[in-house]
Amino acid sequence: MAAISGFPALADLRGRDLLSSADLNAAQTKALLDLAADLKAGRQRIDLQGRTLGLIFSKASTRTRVSFTVAMARLGGQTIDLNPQVSQVGRGEPVADTARVLSRYVDALAIRTFAQSELEEYAHWASIPVINALTDLEHPCQALADYLTLKEAFGDLSGLTLSYVGDGNNVAHSLLLCGALLGVNVRIGCPEGYEPDAAVLERARELGAANGAAVEVLHEPVAAVRGAHALYTDVWASMGQEEEKAARERDFAGWCLDETLIAEADSRAIVLHCLPAYRGLEISAGAIEGPSSRVFDQAENRLHAQQALLAALLDTP
Ligand code: CP
Ligand code: NVA
């Protein structure tokens, strides 16, 4: 018997991959948030009966690695750390071989890497679910936790506006796609030259049109945040862009998410950041520590959102 009861929209996710926020449809995205809320409140208990998640992380991580590990433990499963530096992956064993071998041992893989194409190659060769734990293109698990946090603050998500100010990066891409599916208007405010990927924007606009959400890109910070219900930012230089850090700090001057910008948003607006954060650069200390901040609830919600996702992908018919 299926372990998850009361969520018919999740049945089609059994055995599937999550490589992009757009791999989910609107009903599945909403159901994952509802299941995450139920798990958080203790209204659902799910037993994955000892199943194993492999973690292949080619980049640093605190939240994603730990929240996946704890999520599996809470679901009655376990994780195994497959750090590329100490596995044969680091010595150049082909992804095609690694993915097929690991599929014989573990029940799912969560992968953090640089190129989306490498993640897709794992998914192509693996016969088990592959989860995007962050690539240069997307961070879909983060977006689920972010919209769960927004839902906790406002109840109904549809018609809300989330303003992301900063680099049009992986986090921005998943916020665009996931927000569009949930009927949340997503505004990206960024300096010229730091816009989100054009193909992601186009897909988000299509999904938004189908779900009653608008997608906008603005190049002026106050206009970007005016009246918004959530203000969100992320680092200006992502992992892999360390050499661009100084140039980016110059280009992003005037784009710090601070109390002045918060004053332009809706009076109930919440402040979000995926973390890790650099106070005094993309966000002020006052914004991250102030009364509007929900960043630590947001970080906690990684755990609940990923429990819901793992339960759906690893559920048995
Ligand atoms: N937000 C996030 O993904 O954090 P980590 O890099 O610590 O996993
Ligand atoms: N955009 C950031 C997110 C870190 C969680 C990065 O890719 O480094």
Image (cartoon, rainbow, N blue to C red):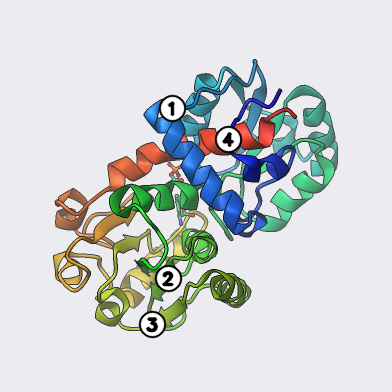
Contact between labelled residues 2 and 3, with CB atoms less than 8 Å apart: no
Contact between labelled residues 4 and 3, with CB atoms less than 8 Å apart: no
Cα–Cα span, label 3 and label 4? 41 Å
At label 3, the amino acid type is Leu
Q: Is mark 1 within 8 Å of ligand 1?
A: no
Residue 296 placement: quadrant = top left
Mark sitting earlier along the chain (3/4): 4
Mark 1 or 3: the one toward you: 1
At label 1, the amino acid type is Arg
Local secondary structure at mark 3: strand
Mark 1 or 4: the one toward you: 4
At label 2, the amino acid type is Asn
Cα–Cα span, label 1 and label 3? 41 Å
Contact between labelled residues 2 and 1, with CB atoms less than 8 Å apart: no
User: Vertical placement of 35 versus 180: above or below?
Assistant: above
Instruction: Please give the residue where the numbered disc 3 appears in the rendered image.
Output: 218
Identify the residue shown where x is 33% and y is 47%: 152
Instruction: Please give the residue where the numbered disc 4 appears in the rendered image.
Output: 6
Quadrant of the snapshot with the C terminus: top right
Query: Is residue 312 at least partly visible in the picture?
Result: yes
At label 4, the amino acid type is Gly
Instruction: Please give the residue where the numbered disc 1 appears in the rendered image.
Output: 43
Mark 1 or 2: the one toward you: 1
Mark 3 or 4: the one toward you: 4
Identify the residue shown where x is 49% and y is 54%: 239
Cα–Cα span, label 1 and label 2? 30 Å
